[in-house]
Amino acid sequence: MTAAPASTANATLQPPRAARVATWVYFGLNGFAVGMWVVHIPNVERATHISHSTLGLLLLVLGAAAFLGMQIAGPLADRIGQRRLLPAAGIFLGLSLFGPGLATNWWTLGLTLMLFGFGNGSIDVAMNSHAVVVERAYPRPIMAAFHAMWSIGGAFAALIGAAVLRADVDTRLTLSACGAFCIAVSLLAARYLIEAPREPVSDGKAELSTDEPGKPSSRLVWQLGALAFGLMLAEGVANDWAALQFRDVLDTSASTAAYAYGAFAVAMTVGRFATDRVAALIGPAAIVRYGAALAAVGLTTVILVPWVPVGLIGWALFGLGLSGGVPQLFTAAGNLDHRASGALMAKVVGLGYVGLLAGPAIIGGLTHWMPLNVAFALPVILCILTFLSANVLKPDQTKDSANS
């Protein structure tokens, strides 16, 4: 496959490798910013004198603001270009990171979390949209590695956060320094970004399928969004419930329980670094289909076998299976129509984000009616439905062949 002529033209002005590294930086930066906020949540909660229930409500506000940011950033990326929007979103995210550490009560924290959520949602869509632009200039898929860098950024945040918390560094100073770091890195990386071609797509090659010539199928957008919702809901379940499953169902210690999430997170990160090369060989539909099948097998193993070593293997298989699916869906959404790449991606990313937030809460609700292991049947069912629906990505392979 060769890159589109316009992308090639951009690449001669700004080397794709430099743009790729810059996009890696933004993904890592976003993971780092979110991670630094997460590890400081207990300190912020104590400083603002709020209860766990109030914090839970404020986190919902953060999620709603992030969703709003996604829906605004998508069309804005199409209007002003990803090259302008992504650094602006990074700077906004950095500025908003100052807020939680400076909050003194519930309403100031709520306001700062609205800003932080909006910035997080904006940079999420902006960096994924730019990643699609960069990927078009490459002869093979590269999207999954960008998502792996988000995980790497979060891992660095956990390590640095643990160090500063151990040293009893003031949370206001830590989050402000991290915010300033985000602003500086966003400005430095901005010069290496590239712009999407602005001319309209008239040959139909940018779409997977259409309702009418030149316009992407709205049904297809919702199908991609539904798949993203299901896969990210499953990811959210692992994020919040893997350790609790080990502790409560297998009756392990808290330290041993942490290995459950660790197995999932490490397998997902490694899988994302490997996914791109595998996708180049077997195509995105196969990555989504067989990844969902592997995830279903992994979580089913967790449910059925009450033994810690097997449970660790199950959570690792779950993470490995989920690792490649979402990047394929985001790439497909960004390539439905080059003229509205950001807006279409915002819908799919937004639905996926709703799933990520909803998953833990849904499982929590189900545990009032059934054991935790039985409640895990929900993400298993969603993985099976994804396996059965992955053919929605098949036309993308036809498009790639046409561009070759």
Image: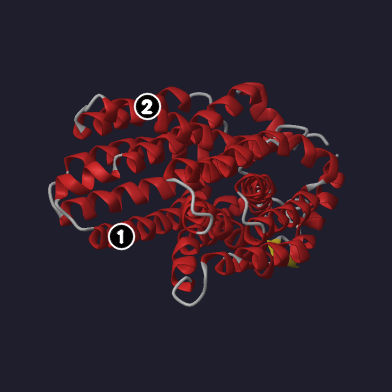
- As drawn, 107 above or below 223: above
Neighbour tally class for label 1: few under 14, some 14-19, many 20 plus, Cα within 10 Å: few
Looking at this view, is 63 or 298 the one in front? Answer: 298
- Give x and y (percent) for residue 183: 34, 29
Q: Residue at x 59, y 22 (%)?
A: 18
Which image quarter holds the N terminus? Answer: top right
Q: Residue at x 53, y 24 (%)?
A: 192
Q: Which residue is under mark 1?
A: 56
Pointer 1 and pointer 2: residues touching (CB < 8 Å)? no
Is residue 253 shown left or right of residue 279?
A: left
The disc labelled 2 sits on which kind of residue? Ile
Residue topped by disc 2: 160
Rendered-image quadrant of the C terminus:
top right
Q: How many angstroms separate mark 1 from mark 2 (CA)?
A: 25 Å
Circle 2 SS class: helix
* Residue 131, percent from left and from top: 60, 38
Does any portion of residue 243 appear in the rendered image? Answer: yes
Displayed quadrant of residue 93: top left
Residue 177 sits above or below residue 391 on the image: above
Q: Position of residue 184 (x, y in %)?
A: 36, 24
- Tell me which residue sits at (22%, 49%) in the image: 45
Badge 2: how crowded within 10 Å, few (<14), some, or many (20+)?
some
Residue furthest to the bottom in view is 369
Residue type for callout 1 = Gly
Of label 1 and label 2, which has the lower sequence position? 1
Where is residue 268 drawn, in percent x and y?
A: 62, 42
User: Residue 32 is drawn in which quadrant?
Assistant: top left
